[in-house]
Amino acid sequence: MAFANRVLLKDPSLGPLGLVPCAVGGPMGTKISEWARGSFLYKQLLRRAKASRRGGGSIRGVLWFQGESDTVSEVDARMYKRRLLNLFSNLRADLGSPLLPIVYVAITSGQGSYVETVRKAELGIKLEKVRCVDAKGLPLLQDNLHLSTQAQVRLGQMLADAFIIQNHVASPSNNTSSP
């Protein structure tokens, strides 16, 4: 809600805003490999995205926040950048929008010891109309993994600011926003 409220406050010209959640929660989350083209999660994401277009809706962007589970295995952490780039490319192709704006989060914590490897991968993405929001420095719960409520609200606002920029800028960007 922090994202939607901020977008509507800062740019009412965007009109009605609908969010299509595709998140998979739980104590372990998901690895990026579980979102590969053809996987169950990827097919569900496409199904929901395409359903959102019925009745005249349009997809104005993608928000992505994932990666903590990929910090457990060195192989997953090292493959993260390639897998994330593939996901973004596949989504754009399968949704028929080669420059679909994407705003994603660079994680601040993880379940394993390869947090910095995944963060480096996330912070190293350089694609047109793709923007990174860095969660580093946002407060965590006592489990040192999940963001506090205050941090989630702040992150939603950061995502909104980056989304608005992406929808008003036509040039390539890999800018990173921080808390």
Image (tube, rainbow, N blue to C red):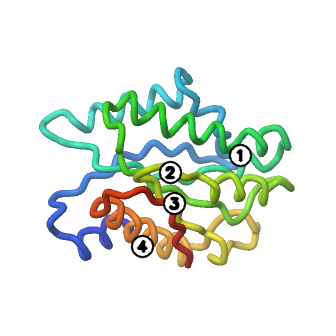
Label 2 vs label 4: CA separation? Answer: 14 Å
Query: Please, what secondary structure does the residue beneath circle 2 have?
Result: strand
Q: Position of residue 157 (x, y in %)?
A: 42, 73
On the image, numbered disc 3 is attached to which residue? Answer: 174
**Among the 4 quarters of the image, the one containing residue 158:** bottom left
Residue found at x 55% / y 54%: 65
Is residue 178 found left or right of 115 in the rendered image? Answer: left
Of callouts 4 and 1, the N-terminal one: 1
Disc 3 residue crowd, few under 14, some 14–19, many 20+, Cα 10 Å: some
On the image, numbered disc 1 is attached to which residue? Answer: 28
Q: Nearer the viewer, mark 4 or mark 1?
A: 4
Of callouts 4 and 3, the N-terminal one: 4
Disc 2, disc 4: CB below 8 Å? no
Label 4 vs label 3: CA separation? Answer: 18 Å
Query: Please, what secondary structure does the residue beneath circle 4 have?
Result: helix
Q: Is residue 146 above or below residue 81?
A: below
Which quadrant: the C terminus?
bottom right
Of callouts 3 and 1, the N-terminal one: 1
On the image, numbered disc 4 is attached to which residue? Answer: 157
Disc 1, disc 2: CB below 8 Å? no
Q: Nearer the viewer, residue 109 or 104?
A: 104
Q: What residue type is labelled 4?
A: Gln
Q: Position of residue 150 (x, y in %)?
A: 53, 78
Farthest residue to the top: give it: 38
Query: Please, what secondary structure does the residue beneath circle 3 have?
Result: loop
